[in-house]
Image: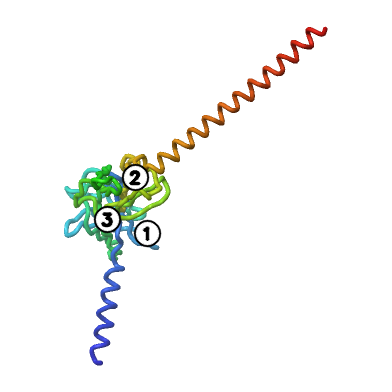
Amino acid sequence: MSSTPSVVLFLAWITTDVHSEKILDRLRDSTVVLSPDHVEDPITIITWRYKTHLAADWNGQKAPFSRIFKDGCSLNTETGELTINSVRLEDGGVYTTQINNKTQTAVKLQVFSPVPKPNITLSCNPEETQCTLSCTFNRTDDLGEVHIFWILDDKLKKEGKELNITKETKELMFICSLENSVSSGNSSELQNPLFFKNEDVLYLVFFALYTSLLFVVGLIIIHQSKKNSSFHLFSKSVFIF
């Protein structure tokens, strides 16, 4: 029982440590703005550090940047915000700042690349009664965590790298979609390879086309009959006259 307070204190320390760091996910080559906590007093001193390296140090004069951040960075001396243009993958890491010698909440910058366009590979059994659709792409560490979804007929979504379909599958179009925390991308559409192999479906399609054709022919015959009737009546009237 005496160990309970120690456990509570330990958990409280973990929670405080997690919340003392803001996580910021950004796309490679984009512009990133690192913002400190709100400061009430006028800012006179700003210090930004990247990991253990000095990034920017301002004390009322022109902001001197370190060699790493010399190009493509700017410092807002009124708010303390550090802007990084065309952020690189190697710019990711923990940034700490002091405003007026007061330590602010750290920012963990995570830089990711955009997801590539995925491809769909198809594998069917010899009877061609069921198929497995696989979403493939070049997975690299700079993508971060990637979620894979399947879009069926532009509306229904299913998660997972593979999608199994059978002759009973009603959807006609499949798209594989990738998402990470900063981007998304879709594959080209794939038509249901089993749809036109289903004899029942083929029969229904043929029947629908045949019925439509008969309907159109019937309309033409009716229209032509009415036209001929009008012509005969007109001819008869002229003859009587």
In the rendered view, does 220 fall on the left or right side of 130?
right
Tell me the kind of residue under disc 1.
Pro
Tell me residue 7's x, y (percent): 25, 83
Q: Is residue 173 above or below residue 50?
A: above
Judge whether 219 appears above or below 152 on screen. above
Lower position in the chain sequence, tag 1 or tag 3: 1
- Number of the front mark, 2 or 1: 2
Residue position for label 1: 42
Residue at (79%, 11%) from the top-left corner? 237
Q: Give the quarter of the image for residue 102.
A: bottom left
Q: CA distance from mark 2 to mark 3?
A: 55 Å
Q: Position of residue 63 (x, y in %)?
A: 26, 50
For the residues labelled 2 and 1, the Cα–Cα distance comes to 54 Å
Of residues 17 and 165, which is closer to you in this image?
Answer: 165
* Identity, as a three-letter code, of the amino acid under mark 3: Asn
Q: Is residue 214 above or below residue 79?
A: above
Which secondary structure, mark 3? loop
How is the protein colored in the picture? Answer: rainbow
Q: Residue at x 61, y 23 (%)?
A: 221
Q: Which mark is residue 175?
A: 2
Question: Quarter of the image containing the C terminus?
Answer: top right
Local SS, label 1: loop
Task: Depth check: give the residue in front, 167 or 162.
Answer: 167
What residue is shown at x 41% (from left), y 45% (from top)?
154
Residue at the disc numbered 3: 59
